[in-house]
Amino acid sequence: MLDVMQIQEIIPHRFPFLLVDKVVELNANKSIEAYKNITIGEPIFQGHFPGHPIYPGVMIIEGMAQAGGVLAFLSGKEQGIDISKKVVYFMSIDGCKFRNPVRPGDKLTYKLDVLKVKGGIWVLAGKAFVDEKLCAEAELKAMIVDK
């Protein structure tokens, strides 16, 4: 549905911190499915961990948050909000659990569902999968504010 060039028009993140390669499904104000291909060329693997590369859990959560930002921005755009004048701030992570490691060569799929939207505050249930195996989950809270 959205490729990496279109994603960069929505959120401000850039390499090496853009952690969403493609959005495959988006239901405004409801849900998003996106993914990131994890490659050995990721700069993070220079130090995490040499000889035994594991994609850091904090990067998985950040990728979920970025996908959630795409969902919030595009949902706002549908409501006529000028997203070019807005930014999403991450507020909290609750109930975070890491279930399985993510390694180079994996396709990390993010699935987020909207739990609540009130004003500019979004609460999302996020899960990350590799080959349908749950790798991480968390409840994310973010707010959309003026730049």
Image (cartoon, grey):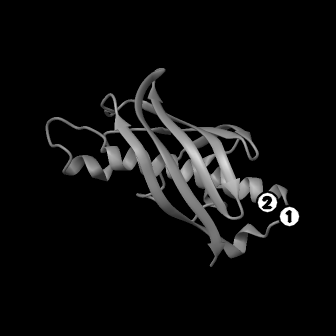
Question: Which amino acid does the dot numbered 2 rest on?
Answer: Lys
| Residue 67 seen from this side | yes
| Residue 13 seen from this side | no
> Tag 1, which secondary structure?
loop
Residue at the spot x=59%, y=50% of the render? Answer: 123
Q: Is residue 50 left or right of residue 86?
A: left
Residue at the spot x=46%, y=29% of the render? Answer: 129
Instruction: Give the answer, above or below, for where 129 lies relative to 116.
Output: above
Q: Is residue 117 left or right of residue 102?
A: right
> Tag 2, which secondary structure?
helix
Question: Which amino acid does the dot numbered 1 rest on?
Answer: Gly
Residue situated furthest left in the rendering: 51
Q: Nearer the viewer, residue 139 or 10?
A: 139
Q: Nearer the viewer, residue 29 or 18?
A: 29
Q: Quadrant of the C terminus?
A: bottom right
| Res 15 label | none
Residue bearing mark 1: 80
Residue at the spot x=67%, y=72% of the render? Answer: 86
Residue 37 in percent (x, y) is at 46, 37
Residue 130 in percent (x, y) is at 43, 26
Residue 91 in percent (x, y) is at 49, 62
For the residues marked 1 and 2, what is the alpha-carbon distance in whole angstroms? 5 Å
Which quadrant holds residue 25? Answer: top right
Residue 53 in percent (x, y) is at 22, 38
Q: Is residue 146 left or right of residue 35?
A: right
Residue at the spot x=31%, y=41% of the render? Answer: 55
Residue bearing mark 2: 77
Which quadrant holds residue 118? Answer: bottom right
- Tell me whether the residue at label 1 lies in contact with that at label 2, contact meaning CB atoms closer than 8 angstroms: yes
